[in-house]
């Protein structure tokens, strides 16, 4: 007999102590007062050597009622009977418990125990279900229908004939008693057969009733499930009905808003109709203006064609001028070389003049000594009487004096001839002007004239010296107009950029000369340098400027002209300027080349394949960067930088490729 244990709630147990576990599906029970949902659990827990069986009922997921048999448990061989008894109670209450598979690993068994409402692991909190006596379900009384086994029909043994001593007076009485006994025995046998038949009929009837009972229980369970499903469907229909009501109200509100919006649209349509009529009138006027504009465009196209013809002629003239300018530059270079040779000759002649001056000074001293000796001798001769020996001595001194005078005249003639060979060079060097007038490059030393006074021919006219400063500036040369229709470029691009104070961006005739795009050079990378090992410069797409402190800049070169380039090798060309920057980073020197687009103001930075490691490779890398710039049509010149000072900072700030730290 199972009894309610009000002291138990959730059963604390480890996963290894659970021997057997059954669980039923939730069952709904309705009464006049309330509706309850109940679940049945049956578990067998091992306690040392005994096994305790529990029947637990969970009501509405709020209360738990635990039933168990008295005592500490049963032996392991006897507990299956207790499990069957608990299953009988559960089935009698309308549950259908199913066995839970526990043939898992310890971790999975622990998960099963944790998910069971009536069990909890040691050290964990329970499900919070209430337990106790109030409202506990009453277990049904099990009716055991024990059908007695049919007793075997006992055959009454026939009485054995025993020898009876026959007396002569009692034979009739013995025969009568034996007949009565036989009749009674026959009657008992008939009654026994009748009872046996009645017992068999009752047993069959009992079996039929048990079968009907099981069928009735199954039908009741099915009916309960149907009721639960119908209750769920009813709740679903109610929620759907409420949702439909809410949706209907929302639709009605939306319909009202749409009607209001339709009225607004009708008013807006009327306004748009009036506006459309006005636009149609404006469109007609614009069509007339368009026809007039087409005529103007035709006239402008004719004018453009004429301008293009003129621009081609101007381009041809520009090319001829460039050719003449190149010839003039070659003449300037040859003149510069001749001037260098003349300066060397002047130096040689000056050294010869100095040596001759020293010899002349020596001769003058000797002549002065001879004159003093001659005067002394003349004085002695005037004081002494004249004789033949004195006359001979005087004659000898006169010859020596004449010889000295002849040697002096010869030296002076040689000096005069040397002075006449360099009058033009002496006049150019005597001016002390800038180096450009003598054909010298900036930074070269000029030699002043050292012609002795009195030896230069005053009547000789010097030829005018040819220098680069005598050429007209590039800006005064006639530049061809830009090709293309003026409508193809925006007004911002059509405006000329202001010239840079540092000299960068100077172009022939204010027109950038077109050059090849950078992407056409050597399959995607750029190489330059006239040495045996060329220096290759590659585009560094991750850099948009050269970051450096102002004190780390060693050299800075900039282009004196602009060139039309495609820095990334794709897309259209744009006017670009070139810069070369050399930096000192610790003990190493690094070289950067940069192309700056004057239209989109973007800087593309190019790095050599390997930075220089010593002074020789540094010089070769710088020459390679200059050659790289000249390959794309940029003429580079070095920017003079002071060691420190505001001018250095100002010149570095003018370079758009640098981003000073």
Image (spheres, grey):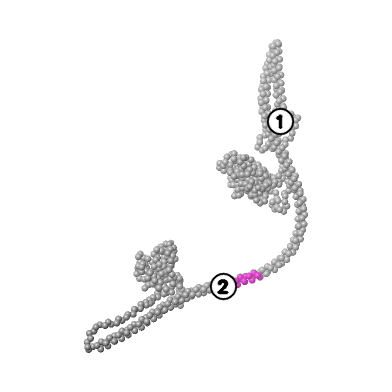
Q: Is residue 21 left or right of residue 443?
A: left
Q: Note whether 167 is above or below 476 in the view shown.
A: below
Horizontal and vertical percent position of residue 6: 38, 70
Tag in front: 1 or 2: 2
Q: Is residue 601 left or right of residue 586?
A: right
The residue sitting at 71% across, 28% down in the picture is 419
> Picture quarter containing residue 70?
bottom left
Which residues are drawn in magenta? 243-263
* Residue pointed to by mark 2: 244
Mark 1–mark 2 Cα distance, whole angstroms, equals 118 Å
* Residue pointed to by mark 1: 422
Q: Residue 463 lies in magenta, yes or no? A: no
Considering the whole magenta stretch, tell me its main secondary structure: helix
Which labelled disc corresponds to residue 231? none
Q: Is residue 516 left or right of residue 542?
A: right
Q: Nearer the viewer, residue 458 or 578?
A: 578
Q: Residue 247 lies in magenta, yes or no? A: yes
The residue sitting at 30% across, 81% down in the picture is 157
């Amino acid at each position: 007999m199972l009894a309610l244990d009000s002291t138990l709630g959730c059963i604390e147990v480890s996963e290894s102590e659970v021997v057997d576990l059954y669980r039923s599906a939730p069952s709904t029970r309705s009464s006049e007062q309330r509706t309850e949902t109940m679940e049945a659990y049956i578990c067998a827990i091992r306690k040392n050597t005994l096994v305790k069986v529990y029947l637990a009922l969970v009501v509405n997921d709020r209360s738990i009622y635990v039933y168990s048999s008295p005592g500490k448990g049963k032996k392991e061989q006897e507990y299956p009977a207790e499990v069957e008894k608990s299953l009988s109670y559960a089935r009698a209450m309308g549950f259908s418990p199913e066995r839970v598979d526990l043939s898992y690993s310890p971790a999975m068994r622990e998960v099963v125990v944790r998910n069971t409402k009536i069990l909890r692991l040691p050290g964990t909190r329970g499900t919070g279900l209430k337990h106790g006596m109030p409202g506990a379900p009453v277990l049904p009384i099990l009716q055991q229908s024990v059908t007695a086994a049919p007793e075997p029909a006992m055959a009454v043994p026939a009485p054995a004939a025993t020898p009876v001593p026959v007396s002569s007076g009692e034979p009739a009485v013995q025969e009568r008693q034996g007949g009565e006994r036989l009749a009674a025995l026959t009657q008992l046998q008939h009654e026994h057969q009748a009872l046996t038949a009645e017992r068999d009929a009752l047993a069959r009837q009992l079996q039929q009733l048990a079968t009907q009972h099981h069928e009735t229980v199954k039908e009741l369970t099915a009916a309960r499930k149907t009721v639960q499903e119908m209750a769920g469907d009813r709740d679903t229909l109610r929620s759907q009905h409420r949702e439909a009501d809410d949706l209907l109200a929302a639709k009605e509100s939306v319909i009202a808003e749409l009607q209001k919006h339709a009225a607004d649209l009708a008013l807006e349509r009327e306004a748009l109709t009036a506006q459309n009529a006005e636009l149609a009138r404006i469109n007609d006027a614009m069509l007339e203006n368009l026809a007039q504009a087409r005529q103007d465009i035709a006239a402008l196209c004719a004018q453009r064609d004429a301008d293009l013809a003129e621009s081609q002629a101007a381009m041809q003239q520009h090319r001829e001028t460039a050719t003449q300018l190149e010839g003039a530059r070659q003449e300037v270079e040859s003149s510069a070389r001749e001037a260098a040779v003349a300066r060397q000759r002047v130096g040689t002649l000056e050294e010869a003049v100095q040596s001759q001056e020293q010899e002349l000074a020596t001769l003058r001293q000797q002549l002065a000594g001879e004159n003093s000796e001659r005067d002394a001798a003349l004085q002695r001769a005037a004081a002494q009487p004249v004789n033949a020996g004195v006359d001979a001595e005087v004659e000898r001194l006169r010859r020596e004096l004449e010889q000295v005078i002849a040697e002096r005249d010869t030296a002076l003639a040689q000096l005069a001839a040397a002075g006449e060979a360099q009058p033009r060079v002496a006049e150019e060097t005597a001016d002390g002007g800038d180096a450009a007038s003598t054909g010298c490059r900036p930074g070269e030393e000029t030699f002043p004239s050292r012609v002795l006074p009195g030896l230069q021919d005053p009547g000789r006219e010097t030829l005018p010296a040819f220098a680069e400063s005598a050429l007209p500036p590039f800006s005064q040369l006639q530049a061809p107009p830009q090709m293309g229709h003026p409508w193809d470029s925006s007004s911002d691009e059509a405006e000329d950029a202001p010239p840079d104070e540092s000299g960068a961006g100077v172009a022939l005739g204010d027109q950038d000369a077109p050059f090849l795009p950078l992407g056409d050079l050597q399959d995607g990378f750029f190489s330059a340098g006239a040495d045996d090992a060329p220096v290759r410069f590659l585009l560094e797409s991750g850099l948009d400027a050269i970051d450096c402190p102002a004190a780390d800049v060693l050299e800075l070169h900039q282009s004196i002209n602009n060139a039309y380039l495609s820095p990334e090798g794709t897309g259209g060309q744009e006017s670009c300027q070139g810069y070369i920057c050399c930096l000192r980073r610790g003990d190493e020197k690094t070289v950067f080349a940069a192309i700056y687009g004057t239209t989109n103001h973007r800087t593309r930075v190019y790095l050599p394949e390997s930075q220089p490691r010593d002074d020789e490779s540094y010089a070769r890398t710088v020459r390679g960067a200059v050659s790289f710039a000249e390959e794309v049509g940029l003429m580079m010149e070095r920017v003079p930088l002071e060691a420190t000072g505001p001018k250095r900072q100002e010149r570095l700030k003018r370079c758009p490729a640098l981003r000073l730290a």
